[in-house]
Image (cartoon, rainbow, N blue to C red):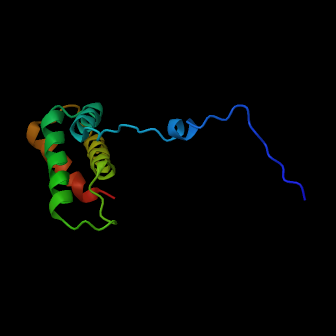
């Protein structure tokens, strides 16, 4: 049996290094994302409320159980903010007071799925 040898004229021995180069990644700013979501659904005090909700979930992730089925990341924060927006739309008041906004946001934590 004859052995065949194939030489590719385009083979570059450095090709694997190019394919597997390092990539820099960053953690997203949950506070800024939360602030934008709250502003987009009509909250006036979005900066203060997003800071509070992000701090709450950060504490949960640090101090509560680290089992995989518990989610305290961006998905959980986003679902709370979306629920707060839906609760605010149900009330159908164009401008909330500061206290009403806080109540809507913290009630929506119980609605989270």
Residue closer to the observer: 84 or 12: 12
Quarter of the view holding residue 93: top left
| Residue under the image location 18 percent in, 52 percent down | 58
Screen quadrant of the N terminus: bottom right
Q: Is residue 59 above or below residue 52?
A: below
Looking at this view, name the residue that lies furthest to the front.
Answer: 2
Residue closer to the observer: 52 or 3: 3
Quarter of the view holding residue 102: top left
Screen quadrant of the C terminus: bottom left
| Residue under the image location 59 percent in, 38 percent down | 13
Residue closer to the observer: 67 or 47: 67
| Residue under the image location 24 percent in, 52 percent down | 108
Looking at this view, name the residue that lies furthest to the left.
Answer: 99
Residue closer to the observer: 108 or 73: 73
In percent of width and height, residue 81 lies at 27, 45
In the drawing, does residue 47 fall left or right of residue 22? left
In percent of width and height, residue 34 lies at 25, 39
Q: Is residue 104 visible?
A: no
| Residue under the image location 33 percent in, 65 percent down | 68
């Amino acid at each position: 049996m004859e052995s065949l040898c194939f030489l590719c004229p385009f083979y570059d021995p450095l090709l694997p290094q190019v394919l597997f180069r390092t990539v820099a990644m960053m953690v997203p700013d949950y506070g800024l994302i939360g602030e934008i979501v709250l502003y987009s659904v009509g909250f006036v005090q979005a900066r203060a409320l997003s800071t509070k909700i992000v701090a709450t979930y950060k504490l949960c992730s640090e101090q509560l159980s680290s089992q995989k089925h518990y989610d305290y990341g961006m998905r959980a924060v986003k679902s709370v903010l979306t629920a707060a927006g839906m609760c605010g739309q149900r009330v159908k008041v164009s401008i909330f007071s500061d206290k009403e906004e806080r109540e809507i946001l913290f009630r929506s934590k119980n609605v989270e799925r």
